[in-house]
Amino acid sequence: MAARAIFITGGGSGIGRATAQHFAAKGWFVGLGDVNEAGMAETAATLPAGQSSIHRMDVRDRAEWKAALDGFVAASGGRLDVLFNNAGIARGGEFAVMEPADSDLLVEINLKGVINGAHVALPYLSATPGSCMLNTCSAAGLYGGPGLAVYAASKFGVRGLTEALEIEWRPLGIKVRSIMPSFIDTPLLNVVTAGSNATARDNVRDAGLEFTPVEDVAQSAWDAVHGDRVHVVVGKTAKSMAFAARWMPGTLRKKLSARLGGEA
């Protein structure tokens, strides 16, 4: 029987690369999808020989999704055990100063890209017993914070899609899960915040928040695929936010407002 197989978007760096390494170490065949061909080649070079395939694709393009998954399933021996919708971008800054083009990109990549993946992957997942679609959500999908309005909206969309499809696809034998990490020290944090000269990494550091190791996120992806929780919250900040959003939303809103010097 062919090895179990996972296809990872955003496989050229960060969470995608760490997850590819984690699953490959456990004997899985790994497909890497990304617009970053050099990054995918670097990831593949860290994996066992013959245990991966590379597929240049833009998650915004459904035809490229189809070509990538067709190629991957042919290489994997007909299996798609896990689709990991991980590709995403970060853009920040107060809504009033954000460029509309950045808002469009956030929605197109972070949300539409996941929807495209779900549409195209469904037949392959249905044909693989015990399959799972895993989505990278975010702590921003727990509570919308200032400076992250559209990013949070995109991640709330991923959260809602995950919860709905987990119910719809259950009779098909497909699990649907998400991971909700806090701040990860990946290239996404290099983006300069709109209306500022600071990067997202600078803002996280200045706020005294922790960076969750990318290896922890990869382990959480493994746990999500093999566990029963629809959402797996990852990292101290995300877990604190999940608790506050559920039990103390007023307190959380005041703390977030205080960062802007405002009042809730």
Image (cartoon, rainbow, N blue to C red):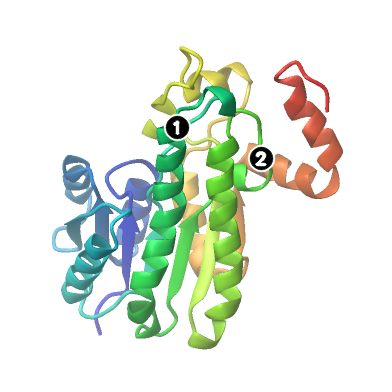
Q: Secondary structure at mark 1?
A: loop
Report whether 133 appears left or right of 58: right
Between 134 and 145, the residue placed more toward the observer is 145
Q: Amino acid at mark 2?
A: Gly
Q: Position of residue 172 (x, y in %)?
A: 49, 86
Compute the Cα span from label 2 to label 1: 21 Å
The quadrant of the picture occupied by the C terminus is top right
Between 248 and 51, the residue placed more toward the observer is 248
Q: Position of residue 132 (x, y in %)?
A: 45, 72
Name the mark on residue 185: 1
From the viewer's perspective, is the residue at label 2 or at label 1 nearer? 2
| Residue drawn where x is 52% and y is 80% of the image | 169
Between 89 and 104, the residue placed more toward the observer is 104
Picture layout, residue 204 above or below residue 123: above
| Residue drawn where x is 33% and y is 58% of the image | 8
Residue 62 quadrant: bottom left
In the picture of the structure, the residue carrying the numbered disc 2 is: 144
Q: Amino acid at mark 1?
A: Asp
- Can residue 186 be spotted in the picture? no
Q: Secondary structure at mark 2?
A: loop
Question: In the orientation shown, which residue stands out farthest toward the top?
Answer: 197
Q: Position of residue 149 (x, y in %)?
A: 60, 36
| Residue drawn where x is 62% and y is 51% of the image | 233
Q: Position of residue 257 (x, y in %)?
A: 75, 25
Query: Badge 2 local density, few (<14 within 10 Å), some, or many (20+)?
Result: some
